[in-house]
Structures are given as structure tokens and as C-alpha cells.
Amino acid sequence: MSQDKEQNKNDVEMQEEAAAIPEQKSGYYINRPVLGKGEQSKLRQQLGREKSLFIVIVIGIVFYFTMLRMDSISEVLWMIVHILKPIIYGLAIAYLLNPIVKFVERHVSTALRKAFPKLKKVDSLSRGAGIFSAIIVLLAVIVALCNMMIPELYRSIRNMVVTVPGQLNDALDYITEMMAGDSTLEQIFTQILREAADSLQNWMRTDLLSQVNVLMSNLTEGVINVVSETLNAIIGIIVSIYVLYSKETFSMQTKKVIYALFKPSHANMILHLTAKSNEMFGGFIIGKIIDSAIIGVLCFIVLSILDMPYTFLVSVIVGVTNVIPFFGPYIGAIPSTILIMLSDPKMGIYFIIFILILQQIDGNIIGPRILGSSTGLSAFWVVFAILLGGGLFGVVGMILGVPTFAVIYYIVNMVINHRLEEKLLPIETASYDELSYVDSDGTYVHSQENEFMKDEGNRNADKSSK
């Protein structure tokens, strides 16, 4: 009996200790695990130096032939991606809807446990309520955007098609009147217009028919692609429901496979990087979507007050392009400014001033409050990630390049800090200023100590000179 009481006491103490360490509830890998101690693996111990060299050579040859067949491999990979598009869309939709599901599930579960203490299917009911609410929110947003955007965009584009040719003619007439007093400029401009008109006539006589055929085929292909992508998105929504309902099962299966394939230290590091990547990507993408929606709404309100042309079209362009970090506002502002200036040059100048003010508000007030320090990158690395991602993968690369590079930056920083810790050196960047150094024995000398040593040396030199 006394042993049972002692065992119960020990169990209670262990539970209290576990509760006192919150990071252990979510797993050891949530905080940065300790990297490996550098011991050789069993495979390296069994393989000699010659065998290791042979394996390296074989891997190099395989890599070489893989690069030679990169086009064929890329075609196969793109075909696989095309086939799995509904799954990819489903995973993306589930990732974006997961915060809504978690929010609703948490509150519904609390309410059900209070109202029905003996109910056994609380978790299942709350999960269903969360998924249902998230899908309703998604469909409501899509329907609202379609009802708001399609009529306004159609009206704006129709007005643009009707008015832009006349506005261009007015602009040409204005330029011609300005150059009427200067015979040299007038002759040059007239020659340019004549050559442009001749080129247009030749194009209409020779290439127009073939271009119309190409345009019609592209239009048909575009309609087919739109219908196909719509069907993929619908199937993706259905897939997202299954993913959200069984997300814990998928998570446990993935963790099980990782622990089965890797050593515990490596597995914990992989899981830690996965959790960190989820934190960076989720915080950045969802925050950027909210930020862009706020910017689009603010733009629509101010442009409506100023009574500018193409209000809704310009607001949509500014809001959508704002998803792209750093360069997005300028990418959206340039065509919007041209559209507004064709209608009213004075309004175009007002729009430029407004966009500059809006981006300052977004960059200094709205963006930091929503995004915070989700990436931890400086402005230089943000620009670097956008240019590299955009050059490799286009618009998608410009959007996802920043969080992807943030994960890479975090891994590199983690490895460097680990190497410094092994050498008993400080990991703070500020510790490596101009006067700080590490001597040949591996001892770190701080800049203040260096200054003190210099002052001591100067004082000793003064004393000896005297």
C-alpha cells in the first residue's frame, strides 16, 4: 500500500515537472536541438577511405548524367506536378484554412465541454464545425469577390477599350501642336509616325491573319486552361477537407517515418526545421494576404473620395501586386498611373503622390504590425530573395522567395552559431566589430579589451620616452 502511495506521489511529481517545462509538451524539437557531436556514422566506420572515394566518384557520375538529361527529367516532373495539381491545391487550401479551423475548433470544443460534460465526440464535432466554418468563409470570400470584382472590372475594361484610343489620339494631337513651332522636331516626329503607319499597314496585310489564328487558338486554349484549373480548384477544396480532418494522423505518420529513417539527433533537427519553416511561411503568407487586402480597401476608399477613373480596377491591381514584397507596390503603380494619366494627367500626379504616402504607411505602420519579424531578414536579403526567386520561378518565386530564403538563412545561421559554440566563441554579430579578433590560440579578444591594451601600451611608451 505504501509502495502504491509512493508511486502515485512520484507520478504526480513527474507530471508537475512536465507541466513546468512547456516546450516539452510540443516536442523536444520545437526549440533548436543540439547538433551532432561530429562522431562518424556506422556506415563511415565500416567503409574505408578507398570505398568512400569510390562512392563519391559514382555519385559524381550519376549527377553528371542527371544534368545531361535534365530536360527529360524536368518534363517528367512537370507532368507529375500537372497530374497532382488537385492534391497540391488541396494542400495549399488546407494550409491557408488551418488557422480558421483551429480557432473555431478551440472555441466550439470549450463550449461543448461546458454544455455537455459527458459527450464523447466533442473533438470530432468541434473539428467538423471548424472545417465547415472554414469552407463557408472561403466560399463566401470567393462569391463576394466575384460579385464585387467581375461587374466593376468589366465596366472598367469596357470604358478603357472605348476611351483609350481617343485619349491616345488626343495625346498625339497635343504633341503635334507642341512641336508645330519647331520644324526640325516636327519633321522627325512626322517621319516616325509615317514609318509607324507603314509598318502597321504591312503588318495588317501580311501577318494579321496568321496572328488572328494564333490569337484564337490561344484564346481557346486559355478557356480550356481556365476550366481545367477551376475543376482542379474544386477538387482541391474537397481534398483540403480530408487533409484538415486527418491532419494529426498525417503529422504522426510523417514523424514516424522520419524517426524510422534518421538518427534521433538528425530526426529532431529535421522536425525542428519543419516547424520553423511552417512558422515563417504561415506568418509571412497569411500576414501578406491580410496586409494586401487592407491596402486594396484603403486604395479603393481614397480613390473613390478623389473621384479618380478606373477606381476599382486600379485598387485590385494595387492590392494584388502588393502581395509581392518590396517591388509589388511599384509593379502595380506603374500601369495604374498610365491608365489614370490617359484619362486625366492631373489625377495621375495625385495618384502617384497617394501611392507614395500609402506605401510609407504600409511599410512603417500596417506591415510591421501584421507581419512583425516573421522572416528576420534585412532589407538587402529581402531584395536578393525577390530577385533570385523571380528570376528562377517568376511571380510565384517573387512571393515565396522571401520565406524560402528566410529558412535557408536560418539554417546557415544555426550551423555557423554551432561551429562558433564548439570553438567557445561568441555568436552575437556585434561581437565581431573592427577592433575585436580571435588570436592564434583561439581566444576571443573584445574590442574594449583591445582598446584597453592599446591605451596601456601608449602609456608605457610615454613613460619609457620620458
Image: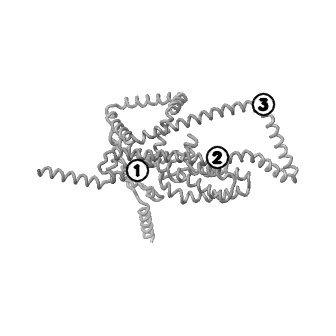
Q: Amino acid at mark 3?
A: Thr
User: Going from the N terminus, do you reach mark 1 or mark 3 first?
Assistant: 3
| Crowding at mark 1 (Cα within 10 Å: few <14, some 14-19, many 20+) | some
Q: Amino acid at mark 1?
A: Asn
Considering every residue shown, the one lying at the far bottom of the view is: 466
Residue closer to the observer: 142 or 352: 142
**Looking at the image, can residue 415 be seen?**
no
Residue at 87% from the left image edge and 52% from the top image edge:
180
Badges 1 and 2: C-beta atoms under 8 Å apart?
Answer: no
Task: List x then y, in percent, for residue 144.
Answer: 56, 48
Q: Check the image and report above or below for 23 versus 68.
A: below
Q: Which mark is residue 151?
A: 2
Quarter in which the C terminus is drawn? bottom left
Q: Amino acid at mark 2?
A: Pro
Q: For residue 205, which quarter of the picture?
A: top right
Q: Check the image and report above or below for 152 versus 213.
A: below
| Crowding at mark 2 (Cα within 10 Å: few <14, some 14-19, many 20+) | few
Query: Which residue does the numbered mark 3 point to in the structure image?
Result: 206
Q: Name the mark nearer the viewer: 1 or 2.
A: 2
Residue closer to the observer: 174 or 375: 174
CA gap, disc 3 to disc 2? 37 Å
Badges 1 and 3: C-beta atoms under 8 Å apart?
Answer: no
Query: Which residue does the numbered mark 1 point to in the structure image?
Result: 417
Helix, strand or loop at disc 1? helix
Q: With 66 as the anchor, is 215 left or right in this view?
A: right
